[in-house]
Every structure is written in C-alpha cells, then in structure tokens.
C-alpha cells in the first residue's frame, strides 16, 4: 500500500490530469479561434452590402447569438454537471463542436456559407459551451488528491487563459491563409480534445442530493455565490470590467477600416494578447502568485482598462506607429487579463465545495461569457452608434471606474492576502465599510 508521503506531489504526475490539460487547451484554442473567425467572416460578408456601422452591428449580433444560450441554460447546465458524469458531458459537447466547425469548413470551402448559417452555428456553439464549461471547470478537482488541488487549479487556470487569448491568434492566421482552413483547424483541435477526454478513466463523483427538488438545487448555486462575498466580488468584477472594455471584439473593424492591415494584420492583433498572456503564464510558472492576490487582481483590471484606452487611441496615430503601439497595448492587455483570470478562477475553485462546483462554475462561465460575448454585442452596438474608437476608449475608462468602485464595495477582495480561505476579522471589514 502506498504511503501518503509517497503520493506524487505535482498534479502533472497524474495521467488523468495530463489528459485533461491537453483536452482543455485544445478545446479552448479551437473555441476562441472559431469565435473570432465567425465575427471576421460575418463582418466581411456584411460589408459587401452594408455600411461600417451596419456591419459592426452584425458583430454585436454574433456575440448575442452565442451568449443567449448560455444565459438561459446556465441553471440547468450547472445542475447537470453536479449530477452526471462530467467526462460524458464533455465528450458529447466536444462531438457537437467538432461537427459544427466541420460543417462551417465545408460550407466555406464550397462557397455557400451565409450569415444565417454563421448565426445558426453561433447558437450551436453557445449551447455546447453552456454544458461544456461547467463540466470542464468542475472536473479538474476530481482528478488529483486534495493535497495537490491548489496547484492543479492554478495550472488549469493558466492553460485555460492561454488558450482563450492565443486561440484568436491561431484563428486569425489560419483565416488569412485560407478561410475554410480556420474552421478545419478548429474541428481538428476539438477532435484532439475529444480524444484526450476519452483517455480519462473513472473519477469520483460528487455526492448527489436526491431528496430536494432539482429547481431548488439549481437556486442553491445562486444562493452560495450571493452569500460568499469574495466569490461574488471576483466574478462580478470581471463581468462588468470586461463587458465594458471589449476592445478585442472590435479587432475586425480596426484591422479592416481603421488600421487597414487586412486578415494578416488581424492575426497579428489577435496574437498580441496571447503573447502577453503567455509571458505572464511563464512568469507564474517560476514565480507563483502567493500574496496580496486581491490587490494584484484589482491592479491588473485597472491596467487592462488603461491598455484598452491606449489601443483605442491608435486611430489618431500614423499608420506604422499605430500598429506598433496597438500591438504593445494588446500585449499588456493580455498579460493583465491573465493575472485577473488566474486570481479569479483560483479563488472561486478553492472556495467552493465539490458538490457545488458545477453550479458555481456555470455561474462563473455565465459572467465570463457575458463579459466576452455580451461584451462583443455591447461593443458592436455601441460602435454602430458612436463609432468604434469612442466605444473602445469609453470602455477602457468604464473598466477603471468599475474597478475602483468594486474596491470600495467589496473590501473582502482588497483584503484577500492569499488563495487560502480568507482570515478577515469582522471588525476589520466593518471598519473598511464604515470608512
């Protein structure tokens, strides 16, 4: 019998967790690469018959088409992830995503792709993600012993964030090479993720509460998040800050009509946040974040807003300089976003019991999707009303204001010293609120 001291002390020593990381990285790369290609292709098709304002509104509608399924299905998907085998849920959804991206690749190759088909597939992607996200997020803690769980969650968060920001770069470059190839690449990555998930053996299942009505159990997820102010603060800060500062949603507009750099330039712009995120992740691998995690998250979101403002202002610079400044601003934006998401996901996972991880993960995914897809809708519609430049700059200013406001409304976030459950005295919090 293996002694406790002889158990592996690093999560990468567990085969199930290694397969999980490969699948998660491949799926997130494909998912976010496909999202930017959907927007770029819809914008180009719309520009053939519409003005810049009308085509910008199509970007907003694409984001809305992906967000609405998540919004309506969130209570159900979280409950499903807490009551059924999370491996099977991910396998089914990855199969659906592989089929959807393959269909778009074939339609683009044959020349009969259209806006209705793109919007339809955006809805399918939204439905698949609604079930996939909570199951993926809640599965990681089931693959390693409790002793290495914090490190496993940190690694999983880094992999997710790198995939989320590097995926659009891959999609942009693949689309520049051949439009149908971008969707084919996504289909291949989803297939890789599916194969990785099939390699994961049986895992412990969370205890099921069979004595209470499913609707009541769905509501429990909202109740838990509402009652845990630290979890509530981290989730909602990202929601409102990124919802406003949606610079990446308007990259197709900047690439085509402001910076005039085309598909190749779009790939460079989309790659810049990934470079920033990757360098930040590399830094974390050597110097893990351990102290003052709340303050660092707040500072990162403020930096995210500043970088967004700088990127928006590239419209006023000479073309060559604008591209260089824009790439630098987007790289800083990606690095700041990596810090923010790393802290948020670690705090949420470590402060949530396993029996509720699916429901809490579904709410976290809803806020992430709201900040991304609904942020795309907000940015697209706002750009149609006031112009893309004003929309980007105004969003960055809004993100900074939201962060300063949250630092006052949620002192628990400022006082979060580490990823361990916070040890904050009631008197200290009361004093912070009174001041």
Image (spheres, rainbow, N blue to C red):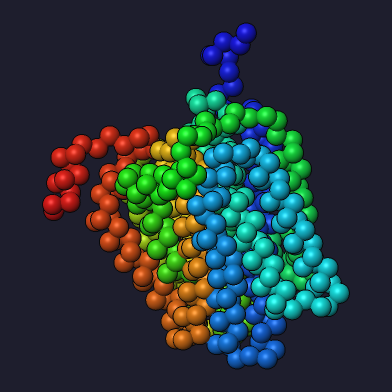
Number of labels in the image equals 0
Front in this rendered view, residue 220 or 153: 220
The structure residue drawn at horizontal position 46% and vertical position 80%, both measured from the top left corner, is 382
Vertical placement of 183 versus 352: above or below? below
Front in this rendered view, residue 319 or 251: 251
Q: Position of residue 433 (x, y in %)?
A: 17, 51
Q: Position of residue 246 (x, y in %)?
A: 48, 69
Q: Quadrant of residue 104?
A: bottom right
Q: Quadrant of residue 199?
A: top right
The structure residue drawn at horizontal position 34% and vertical position 49%, both measured from the top left corner, is 226
Q: Position of residue 216 (x, y in %)?
A: 43, 45
The structure residue drawn at horizontal position 33% and vertical position 64%, both measured from the top left corner, is 402
Q: In this view of the protein, can residue 323 be seen by the observer?
A: no
Q: In this view of the protein, can residue 100 be seen by the observer?
A: yes
Front in this rendered view, residue 135 or 412: 135
Q: Position of residue 346 (x, y in %)?
A: 46, 42
The structure residue drawn at horizontal position 55% and vertical position 87%, both measured from the top left corner, is 53
Outermost residue to the right: 110
The quadrant of the image that shows the N terminus is top right
């Amino acid at each position: 019998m293996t002694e406790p001291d002889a158990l592996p002390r690093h999560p990468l020593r567990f085969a199930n967790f290694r397969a999980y990381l490969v699948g998660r990285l491949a799926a997130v790369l494909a998912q976010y690469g496909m999202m930017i290609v959907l927007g770029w292709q819809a914008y180009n098709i719309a520009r053939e018959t519409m003005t810049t304002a009308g085509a910008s509104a199509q970007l907003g509608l694409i984001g809305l088409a992906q967000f609405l399924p998540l919004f309506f299905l969130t209570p159900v998907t979280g409950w499903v992830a807490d009551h059924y085998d999370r491996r099977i849920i991910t396998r089914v959804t990855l199969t659906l995503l592989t089929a959807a991206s393959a269909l778009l690749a074939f339609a683009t190759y044959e020349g009969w792709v259209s806006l209705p088909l793109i919007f339809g597939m955006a809805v399918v992607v939204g439905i698949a993600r609604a079930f996939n996200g909570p199951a993926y997020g809640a599965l990681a803690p089931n693959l390693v012993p409790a002793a290495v769980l914090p490190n496993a969650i940190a690694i999983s968060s880094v992999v997710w964030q790198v995939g989320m920001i590097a995926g659009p770069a891959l999609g942009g470059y693949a689309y520049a090479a051949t439009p149908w190839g971008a969707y084919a690449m996504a289909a291949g990555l989803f297939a890789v993720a599916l194969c990785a998930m099939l390699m994961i053996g049986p895992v412990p299942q969370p205890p099921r509460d069979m004595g209470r009505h499913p609707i009541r159990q769905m509501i429990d997820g909202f109740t838990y998040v509402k009652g845990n102010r630290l979890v509530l603060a981290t989730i909602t800060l990202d929601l409102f800050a990124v919802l406003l500062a949606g610079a990446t949603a308007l990259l197709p507009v900047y690439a085509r009509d402001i910076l005039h750099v085309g598909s190749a330039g779009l790939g460079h712009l989309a790659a810049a946040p990934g470079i920033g995120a990757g360098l930040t992740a590399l830094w974390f691998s050597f110097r893990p974040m351990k102290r003052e995690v709340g303050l660092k998250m707040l500072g990162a979101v403020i930096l995210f807003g500043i970088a967004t403002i700088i990127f928006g202002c590239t419209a006023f610079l000479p073309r060559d300089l604008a591209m260089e400044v824009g790439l630098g601003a987007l790289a800083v934006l990606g690095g700041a976003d990596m810090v923010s998401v790393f802290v948020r996901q670690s705090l949420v996972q470590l402060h949530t019991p396993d029996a509720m991880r699916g429901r809490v993960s579904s709410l976290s995914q809803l806020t992430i999707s709201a900040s991304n897809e609904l942020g795309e809708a907000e940015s697209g519609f706002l750009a149609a009303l006031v112009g893309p430049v004003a929309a980007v700059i105004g969003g960055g200013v809004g993100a900074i204001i939201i962060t300063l406001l949250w630092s006052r409304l949620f002192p628990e976030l400022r006082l979060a010293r580490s990823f361990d459950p916070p040890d904050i005295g009631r008197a200290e919090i009361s004093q912070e609120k009174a001041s």
